[in-house]
Amino acid sequence: MARLKVGIIFGGRSEEHLVSVKSAREVARNLDPDVYEPFYVGITKDGAWKLCDGPEGEWENGDCRPVVLSPAGDVHGLLVLEEGSYRTVRLDVVLPVLHGRLGEDGAMQGLLELSGIPYVGCDVQSSALCMDKSLAYVVAASAGIATPEFWTVTADETIDPALLGYPVFVKPARSGSSFGVTKVSRAEELAGAVETARQYDAKVLIEAAVVGSEIGCAILGNGSELVAGEVDRIALSHGFFRIHQEDSPETGSENSVAVVPADIPEESRLRVQEAAKAVYRALGCGGLARVDMFLKEDGQVVLNEVNTFPGMTSYSRYPRMMAAAGIPLSEVIDRAVSLALTGKSR
């Protein structure tokens, strides 16, 4: 039987470029060569698209060919520039292994919709919704899901520091990981934190700190048929949780360890998994996502954020949670591709 032609898009122009490359390397190691024929498309930090042999090594400066994803449905794949002319490569499915802006926010998903190629992960609407944390909170709250108290500050707005109770977290409303996030303990620190967040997004989210354990749950599936991975808990050594170091994001976190399975009571674990599924459905997610939450001492589960294409590196939370539930990354990929090809229509 012919192998599936899968396009693996990685890199990208967001601050999470290096993490995306590392995720793609792990995906490449876990692709079954008897099932898939991979076509690796790396997007440089400057936005150039390159068809390369894979995400290893110096692909950005190596012997790669310029390539674009055709928005024309009759091409159904890639246009590769070779010796002054284009050849086409038809794809069966795309794995957009991209994190953050222009990869996880609906932009890439929109291009894939135009191309007519099935793709792994959330659709345009849910990707955009989950990327904007303030909008995600509004929709989740309307579905009866607990969220932090929050305020938004747009590019031309200010907020009176006296209106807030401290501590609060100030973060870009539409950015990934912990880039631009500041914990503010005093009113006089607020303005500087807002300006830090604006380096990544004109829209800034301010949210009240939630006292509780930081937990997460990996979800795989569509509609009512969802599989939850094991719950994890973030154990901090100091400060607040940063999933990786901003100056060298490929090296992982320097102040935390994800405990998998989470060392919480069984009743709490089940409650967290059900809450994660409820969030996933309320925000219209499909394929896969990681739902991050807080577990308070009274047992209440509070939404933190949703990552619609979570990290897939060796230290990333999503594959570790799934592996702890008996689903290795190779099987996650197989299931996610199957969902893209045979799941509910978009």
Image (tube, rainbow, N blue to C red):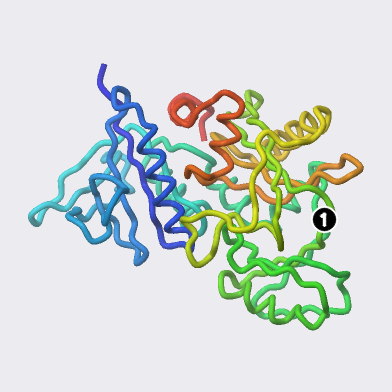
Q: Is residue 280 left or right of residue 168?
A: left
Q: Secondary structure at mark 1?
A: loop
Q: Position of residue 311 (x, y in %)?
A: 51, 46
Q: Is residue 89 left or right of residue 56?
A: left
Residue that sits furthest to the front in the current view: 237
Q: Position of residue 272 (x, y in %)?
A: 76, 35
- The residue shown at (62%, 26%) is 227
- The residue shown at (81%, 42%) is 301
Please name the residue that numbered disc 1 is placed on.
210
Q: In which image quadrant can residue 113 be found?
A: top left
- The residue shown at (77%, 63%) is 207
**Which of 112/62 is in front?**
62
**Which of 277/190 is in front?**
190
Q: Position of residue 293 (x, y in %)?
A: 73, 46
**Which of 27/338 is in front?**
27
- The residue shown at (81%, 60%) is 209
Q: Is residue 73 above or below residue 266?
A: below
Q: Is residue 176 above or below residue 214?
A: below
Q: Is residue 276 above or below residue 224?
A: below
Q: Is residue 288 left or right of residue 83?
A: right
What's under tag 1, amino acid-wise?
Val
